[in-house]
């Protein structure tokens, strides 16, 4: 892969995740302060990610893989997405905000698979090159947060009172339109040659891999993966609202520490897997969720701010040690015919079902512990901490340690 192609793919990844990170992190604060949405409505808004993840395989599997060049479909989806983000920027009520957001996420989630497909098709050795390109997506997410906090201060107390967070949708609308136009200049990525094999619904959803659940160890792992996404949803939905409500300065900028740690711990995953083994690494990832939420429970915006910052910085351990290691474990357990289906099943279970339930639960907890001056965050954060602890204990007791083919590790 030549340097120009690498630069073009890195730019694509940067914009792809700049768009998502630019509004998703702060949406909870925006809905509460600008649209006066309830916790349940906030959960409904965030659950659009899950519905998008559930529907995405149909768009990619039935359309992109069979009829259209990936780069052209990517461009069309982002141009349409840019227009929808502008509509969100102008929307004044949750009743009109939610359906537009739902349509937007149904269009956006398939683009995650499309940028990967475009990248892989330009590489002779994806295991060697992909991580150095994908990391620019994380950089894009970080830059979006830093711009919101340190350049425009839209998440400051003054910005929140003036409704400045609505400008995040305008910023991301412009970025989406740019990526949409830029996509048509990307390397040509036509559909793969069609076969006579019919497209089956089960294959798109990953149900072909259900045979793996017959093995107790994988069943325990899969159940834990789905369940741990319930407390994960609390972080995505409530963290920014929590930090801004208790007046932590530059809250969105500080949250980018999570993505920075994600990059660092991503590089450490292979080392930990070899030294500690799969079960220990997965348990460390789950235990980090317990610690993070306890830090949020007892930290504050004054002398204990360091606890909040540490809780944010644990994101690399929380995400990489469980979800990235889990993808490696899934790949090692699936036979050649089921590798893609197994990853699809894991994605459907976690980002689809698990987080869908999690966003609902987070919304219910936010409403239950609402106060006249904001929220009883101490009580709210104890819920995901306790639930994550239960999943940790159940996984520790039910998952049998086993040797895993670590030849797959270098691909991540």
Image (cartoon, grey):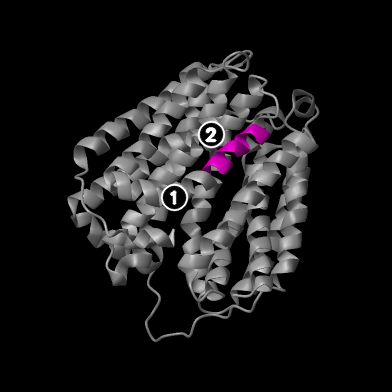
The secondary structure type at the circle numbered 2 is helix
Q: Residues within 10 Å of mark 2 (few under 14, many from 20)?
A: many
Q: Position of residue 343 (x, y in %)?
A: 38, 60
Q: Toward which corner of the image does residue 208 lie, by quadrant? A: bottom left
Of residues 128 and 64, the one nearer the viewer is 128
Residue drawn 38% across and 55% down?
327
Disc number placed over residue 352 in the picture, else none: 1
Sequence-first tag of 2 and 1? 2
Q: Quadrant of the C terminus?
A: bottom left
Q: Position of residue 296 (x, y in %)?
A: 51, 23
Disc number placed over residue 38 in the picture, else none: none
Q: Toward which corner of the image does residue 396 lie, by quadrant? A: top left
The secondary structure type at the circle numbered 1 is helix
Q: Position of residue 237 (x, y in %)?
A: 55, 35
Q: Is residue 38 above or below residue 177?
A: above
Q: Position of residue 305 (x, y in %)?
A: 59, 20
Q: CA distance from mark 2 to mark 1?
A: 25 Å
Residue drawn 68% across and 68% down?
8
Disc number placed over residue 313 in the picture, else none: 2
Q: Is residue 293 above or below residue 187?
A: above
Q: Residues within 10 Å of mark 1 (few under 14, many from 20)?
A: many
Residue drawn 20% across and 40% down?
398
Is residue 261 rendered magenta in the image? yes
**Span highlighted in magenta in the image:** 252-262
Left/right of residue 340 with respect to residue 165 in the rendered view: left
Q: Indicate which label's residue lies in the foreground, 2 or 1.
A: 2
Residue drawn 46% across and 85% down?
194
């Amino acid at each position: 892969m030549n340097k120009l192609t690498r630069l073009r793919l890195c730019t694509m990844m940067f914009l792809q995740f700049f768009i998502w990170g630019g509004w998703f992190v702060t949406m909870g604060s925006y809905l509460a302060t600008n649209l006066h949405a309830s916790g349940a409505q906030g959960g409904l808004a965030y659950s659009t990610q899950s519905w998008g993840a559930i529907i995405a395989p149909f768009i990619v599997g039935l359309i992109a893989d069979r009829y259209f060049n990936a780069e052209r479909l990517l461009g069309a989806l982002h141009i349409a997405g840019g227009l929808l983000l502008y509509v969100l920027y102008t929307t004044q009520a949750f009743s009109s905000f939610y359906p537009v957001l739902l349509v937007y996420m149904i269009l956006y989630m398939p683009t995650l698979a499309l940028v990967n497909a475009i990248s892989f098709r330009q590489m002779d050795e994806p295991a060697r090159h992909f991580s150095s390109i994908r990391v620019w997506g994380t950089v894009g997410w970080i830059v979006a947060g830093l711009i919101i906090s340190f350049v425009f201060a839209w998440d400051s107390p003054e910005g929140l009172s003036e409704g400045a967070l609505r400008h995040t949708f305008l910023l991301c609308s412009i970025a989406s339109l740019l990526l949409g136009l830029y996509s048509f200049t990307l390397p040509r990525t036509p559909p793969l040659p069609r076969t006579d094999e019919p497209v089956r619904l089960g294959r798109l959803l990953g149900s072909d891999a259900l045979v793996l659940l017959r093995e107790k160890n994988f069943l325990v792992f899969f159940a834990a993966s789905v369940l741990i996404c319930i407390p994960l949803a609390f972080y995505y939905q409530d963290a920014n609202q929590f930090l801004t409500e208790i007046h932590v300065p530059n809250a969105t900028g500080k949250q980018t520490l999570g993505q920075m740690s994600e990059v660092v711990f991503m590089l450490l995953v292979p080392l930990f897997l070899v030294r500690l083994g799969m079960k220990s690494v997965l348990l460390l990832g789950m235990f980090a969720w317990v610690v993070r939420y306890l830090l949020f429970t007892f930290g504050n915006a004054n002398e204990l701010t360091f606890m909040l910052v540490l809780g944010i910085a644990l994101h690399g351990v929380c995400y990489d040690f469980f979800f990235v290691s889990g993808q490696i474990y899934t790949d090692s357990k699936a036979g050649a015919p089921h590798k893609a289906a197994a990853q699809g099943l894991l994605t459907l279970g976690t980002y689809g079902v698990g987080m869908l339930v999690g966003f609902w639960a987070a919304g219910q907890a936010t409403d239950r512990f609402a106060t006249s001056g904001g929220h009883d965050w101490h009580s709210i954060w104890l819920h995901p901490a306790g639930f994550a602890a239960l999943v940790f204990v159940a996984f520790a007791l039910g998952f049998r340690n086993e040797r895993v083919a670590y030849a797959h590790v270098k691909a991540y």
